[in-house]
Amino acid sequence: MTVDTQDRKNIRSADMDLWIKQRIKQEQIEKYMQNDRDFIDEDLIFKALKKNVKPDPVRIRDILQKSLTITMLDPDETAALINVTDPELLSEMRDVAYTIKKKVYDNRIVTFAPLYMGNYCVNNCAYCGFRTHNTGMKRKMLTLEQVKKETEVLAGEIGHKRLIVVYGEHPRTDIDYMCDTIKAIYSVKVKTKNSWNSIRRVNVNAAPLSIEDLRRLKECGIGTYQVFQETYHRETYEQVHPRDTLKGHYAWRLYCMHRAMEAGIDDVGIGVLFGLYDWRFEVLALLLHSQDLEKRFGVGPHTISFPRLEPAADAPFVQETKYKVSDDDFKKLITIIRLSVPHTGMIVTARESAQMRRDVITMGCTQTDASTRIGIGAYSDRLNQQEQEKQQFLLGDTRELDDVIREFAEMGYITSFCTAGYRCGRTGECIMDLLKTGAEGKFCKLNAVLTFREWLDDFASSETKAAGEKVIKKEIEEVRSSIPTVFPTLMEYYERTRKGERDLYF
């Protein structure tokens, strides 16, 4: 479906203006504020950064010991880490970050694919190729049949079991469309080499929604609900998100995770588009966001993401910003986030190069996408997936899932396709408690072995299968020695999986 000339002329029709006006519910903002103030205290952030310059190495090592107990740091402690410049201390920070990742998540890497549902949007973000004033953009949205076709490729040819579905903010892709497309994804079952596959977990990246709409998403069986603030710095936020747009409402976006929690979605994902403002400020703001969610709901964010600005069609701001994040600072901020919020999942995306993703996996990242296509309908129409006018931004790593998994295996990591925890109630506060004690890693090691076995048998090339077999053998031996009581059951499930049975889990 493409946009015609009349659609462009009527982009801000009376019906559209009414739809926009009805979106924001002020009472669903004010109920979470304290004394008419939100939880992002800019003065606190700037003072913490200024107060903790030239931190004492002894203090830094004490902070690292606190992180190792899987305890969230406070703003002063995080600011001290941000101000570290000594190469030896930075190396120690990276080592501790990786130790924490292993302690909480073992040596698992979770993979997924993004599925863009459409590029209609009522907003006009200065950095985005989908912005409404980009009249050169060919507007499209997937029909339900096209959604199923994309899913057949993702689940049947590539082998994904997790997706993150991405929606613009527009009446054509409203909550009804979101629910219909999610149900369509879950309905697809596809034949593989040895069995059947389907998408078992659909995460959502969308605009802020009301509590009522979020309850409907919950009923659809979604996994994580992901909304990025983009920048927590108010002045910058207003600069890049015009006030006459929906996204121009800072507080409506800021409290979307609070509304999600109240609606029963207890796995939420937050993030920043690094490069809009000073990364040091944004890291501390992410911490304050995590703290407020945990304080109010007992659960912090399930994941934190940290995409960097990339070139986008008709978005000159990307070239004009003075806050571009260097590779060294990018690695540093990822390390600090792992140390500051040690129990939280961390997502690095295909915006980054293959080399950068290899580097940051050793600094605490736990999830990444692969075989990524961000054009609308690009999985089933791969010849056109790189057309500039269809994309929101440019990708840095377009390798296939098989290539990425083989590389992980050669690095000693097991790729986990497990979605069992979400169906067993290990979400929200439950999973956070398990993560903080290291117990979740044991469940996930078992399920990683089973789901990796599935994927190797159903999708892997001979080279990737050979590399994966070595990892599985090592993982099984670790289970035998570290969790001997469940080893017989694991091996029973493992043999059943080898024979073609699917979706067995602990």
Image (tube, rainbow, N blue to C red):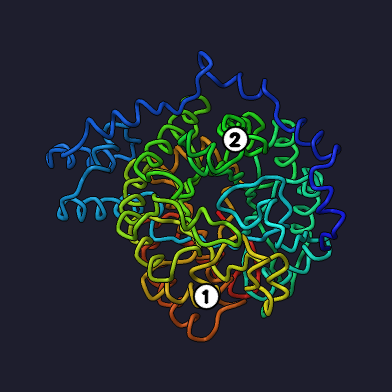
Residue visible at 36% across and 26% down in the picture: 43
Residue in view at x 53 percent, y 56 percent: 316
Which residue lies under the disc numbered 1? 399
Task: Find residue 311 and report its horizontal and vertical position in percent.
Answer: 52, 62
- Residue 138 position, x and y percent, is 74, 63
* Outermost residue to the bottom: 462
Residue 2 vs 261, above or below: the answer is: below
What count of labels does the image hold?
Answer: 2
Quadrant showing the N terminus: bottom right
Whether residue 348 sits left or right of residue 13 in the image: it is left
Mark 1, secondary structure of its residue: loop
Mark carried by residue 367: none
- For badge 1, the amino acid type reads Arg
Query: Earlier along the polypeptide chain: callout 1 or callout 2?
Result: 2
Mark 1 touches mark 2? (CB < 8 Å): no
**Image position, residue 190 (x, y; %):** 74, 71
Question: Relative to the observer, which residue lies in front, 472 or 257?
Answer: 257
* Amino acid tagged 2: Arg
| Residue positioned 29% across, 28% down in the render | 47
- Location of mark 2 (residue): 253
- Between disc 1 and disc 2, the foreground one is 2
